[in-house]
Image (tube, grey):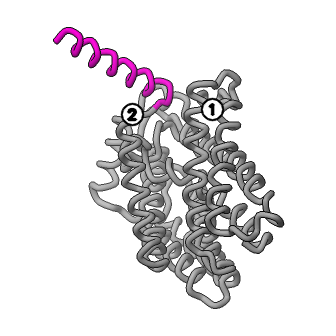
Amino acid sequence: MDNSSAHDGSAEETLEEINKKTGRNMPQAIATAVILIAIIVACLAISMDVFMVLLIVFMILALWELRVDFAIAGMHIPVIMLWICSTVTLLATYYSPWHVSAMAVCVMLSMVLVALSATANFSFGDRLSMEIEHKLAQTNAGARLESSFNHGTANAQHSRLTSVAVSLFTVLYIPLLASFIALSLTFHGHAVAHAIMIVFLPALSDTGGLFAGAWFGKHKLSPRISPKKSVEGLIGSILFAMAGAFVIFACTYPTLWASRWWVPIIAGVLIGVVGTFGDLCASMLKRDIGIKDMGHLLRGHGGVMDRVDSILLTAPFMMALLYVTGL
């Protein structure tokens, strides 16, 4: 009995140490990751149309998270108009025969409509207030004090011009970048492989960076923006993304090794560097607003935006690489 209790205590201490090093609840994070992988793979196995629906759902959830986060800082974005414009943009990009033109026109129209809508302030009743209170309850006082928008109250308001600027930033951050994911599914006849590379390789890179940084990280990458990021973590991100790219390349393009062996290497470096930059941008945004996580929907990961920030930023680079190399 004593041996069993000692073993349980040792296991709990080990788990606590892992959670402390990674900054996450690892059992929850692993369980959430397994569920997300199963959902994405199932959608890809059913059809690309179902995957597009999943992409739109994630985008809608991400936009709502940003609505709440910006509201904490007293800024307003027209989330309903963003939902409509973003959905139309993604569908037009994928289903239109003129994919790039449709994407460009929809993004420009979205910027106009969203900018106009940002001058009005529609109420969501108690729902938004409840979300803000919940977010503030989960945020420590230190993060709030470091915020650039620390006015001593959660009800601070900014000018309409600020709301317009933040709304336009949101259009460029989510629907525009997400459109490159949809665009990558439209060429060279390897839609499933493209989707897997653009969605899973950044996630694999994040995993490599997390563990390499937790166990080997000694040289801080950007201590002011993200204290846990390290040079060793960046190297781990690049190596994990590169290894994943080689596996997908071997399964999808077995006859192109002789002429395209260098593509996974470039993909790994691109995803590792750009994905880490995307994480730092999201960390800077969270620090500026004064929050710890973008949301709380994904247990062990934070919010949807916490999971997709690197995916969004790497999407245009990966799309361009796949298109230029003919893969």
Residue 127 is left or right of residue 275, and the answer is left
Residue type indicated by callout 2: Asn
Vertical comparison of 300 with 93: above or below: above
Residue 160, x across and y down, in percent: 55, 59
In the image, which residues are magenta? Answer: 1-23
Find disc 2 in the rendering and name its residue.
25
Would residue 164 be seen by someone viewing this image from the given angle?
no
Secondary structure found at label 1: strand
Residue 24 is left or right of residue 206, and the answer is left
Q: Residue furthest left?
A: 1
Any magenta on residue 151?
A: no
Residue 187, x across and y down, in percent: 67, 80
Residue type indicated by callout 1: Lys
Find disc 1 in the rendering and name its residue.
229
Any magenta on residue 8?
A: yes
Of helix, strand and loop, which mostly describes the magenta segment?
helix
